[in-house]
Image: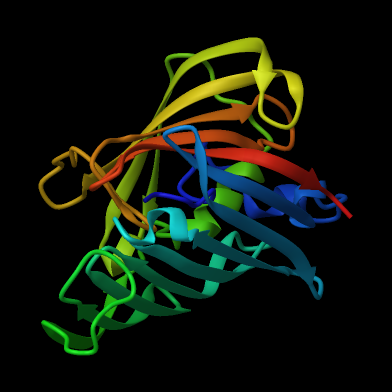
C-alpha cells in the first residue's frame, strides 16, 4: 500500500535557499499528522507522521505505517520511514526506509554527500503474502552502491517538505515534476493538479478548500511512466490526493489500488502544530 502520507505527495517550482533565511520558519516544520487506513469501509490500519526542527537548519521527519490484523491474513503491510533534511540548503542529509509488503521486505539507508548518495539495501522474499511469515525465505539480497544526485534528487519524505516550503499552491492543470529516489533509483515524481474546490467533506477539517492531485513516477532513463507506483510501497494504480490549498499543504485524503486488497484510502484523523 502506498501510505505514506508522505508520501509522495506534492512538488512545486523551486525558490532559492535564501528565501527562508532570516524569516520565520513555516509552522509545518513542527507538526504531527494521524491518519486511518480504510479498506472496504473498515479500519485496516494507521499512519503517523511527526516532524520537528533540530538545531538551526534541520528538520527530522518520522513516519510509521501499521496495518491491523483485519488484513494480515490477506496481505501484510508495515513500514517505518525517516529523514533528516536541511531546510536552509533544501537538501537531504540521511534517510531510512523499511517496509514489509506482502511477500517482500525492503530496508534502505541513504547517506547524502555532495552530488551523490550512498544507498545500502537489504531485501528479503517470504513464502507468503500474509502474516505471520514462515522462517524459511525464498531469498535474500544485499547491495551497497552510490547514486548521483546532481539535479537535486531528494528522498521521498524530504521531497514532501521541499515542495511545501515553496509556499506556492499550484494552479489547476499545472504539471509539476521533482527528482526523487524511490527504492534508491533515480525517478521523477510527476504530479498533475486536476481540480481546486471548496468541499464540506474534507477529512478532519470538514469544510476546506482543497486541490486534487494525481501522482505518477517516471523513469528518468527512458522517460517511461509506470502504471502504478513504487514509492514507499508498491501500488497497482497511480496515487490520488486531496491536499489543503493553503500555506500548510496538508494531505487529507489519499487513495490508490493495493495488490490483493483493491482500493485503500488514507484519511486524516488529526493534525497538530505544537
The residue located at (39%, 58%) in the rendering is 232
The residue located at (23%, 83%) in the rendering is 134
Along the line of sight, the residue nearer the viewer: 131 or 22: 131
Q: What percent of the width, then of the height, locates residue 226?
A: 18, 42
Left or right: 223 with respect to 17? left
Along the line of sight, the residue nearer the viewer: 175 or 15: 175
Task: Tell me if residue 235 comes above or below residue 113 in the rendering.
Answer: above
Left or right: 263 with respect to 36? left
Task: Tell me if residue 225 comes above or below residue 53 in the rendering.
Answer: above
Tell how many labels.
0
Task: Tell me if residue 4 comes above or below residue 227 in the rendering.
Answer: below
The residue located at (51%, 53%) in the rendering is 159
Task: Tell me if residue 41 comes above or below residue 102 in the rendering.
Answer: above
Asked where in the image residue 269 lies, by quadrant, the reply is top right
Left or right: 127 with respect to 69? left
Q: Quadrant of the C terminus?
A: bottom right
Amino acid at each position: 500500500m502506498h501510505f505514506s502520507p508522505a508520501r509522495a505527495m506534492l512538488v512545486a517550482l523551486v525558490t532559492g535557499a535564501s528565501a527562508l533565511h532570516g524569516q520565520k520558519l513555516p509552522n509545518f516544520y513542527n507538526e504531527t499528522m494521524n491518519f486511518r487506513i480504510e479498506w472496504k469501509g473498515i479500519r485496516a490500519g494507521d499512519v503517523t507522521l511527526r516532524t520537528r526542527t533540530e538545531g538551526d537548519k534541520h528538520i527530522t521527519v518520522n513516519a510509521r505505517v501499521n496495518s491491523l490484523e483485519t488484513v494480515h491474513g490477506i496481505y501484510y503491510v508495515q513500514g517505518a520511514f525517516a529523514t533528516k533534511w536541511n531546510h536552509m540548503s533544501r537538501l537531504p542529509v540521511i534517510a531510512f526506509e523499511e517496509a514489509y509488503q506482502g511477500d517482500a521486505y525492503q530496508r534502505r539507508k541513504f547517506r547524502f554527500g555532495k552530488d551523490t548518495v550512498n544507498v545500502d539495501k537489504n531485501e528479503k522474499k517470504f513464502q507468503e503474502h500474509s502474516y505471520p511469515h514462515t522462517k524459511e525465505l525464498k531469498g535474500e539480497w544485499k547491495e551497497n552502491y552510490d547514486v548521483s544526485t546532481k539535479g537535486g534528487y531528494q528522498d521521498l519524505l524530504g521531497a514532501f517538505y521541499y515542495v511545501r516550503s515553496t509556499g506556492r499552491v499550484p494552479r489547476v492543470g499545472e504539471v509539476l515534476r521533482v527528482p526523487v529516489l524511490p527504492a534508491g533509483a533515480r525517478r521523477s515524481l510527476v504530479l498533475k493538479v486536476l481540480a481546486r474546490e471548496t468541499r464540506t467533506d474534507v477529512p478532519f477539517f470538514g469544510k476546506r478548500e482543497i486541490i486534487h492531485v494525481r501522482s505518477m513516477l517516471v523513469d528518468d532513463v527512458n522517460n517511461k511512466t509506470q502504471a502504478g507506483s513504487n514509492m514507499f510501497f508498491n501500488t497497482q494504480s497511480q496515487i490520488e490526493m486531496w491536499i489543503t490549498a493553503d500555506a500548510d499543504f496538508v494531505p487529507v485524503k489519499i487513495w490508490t489500488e493495493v495488490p490483493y486488497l483493491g482500493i485503500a484510502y488514507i484519511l486524516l484523523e488529526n493534525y497538530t502544530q505544537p
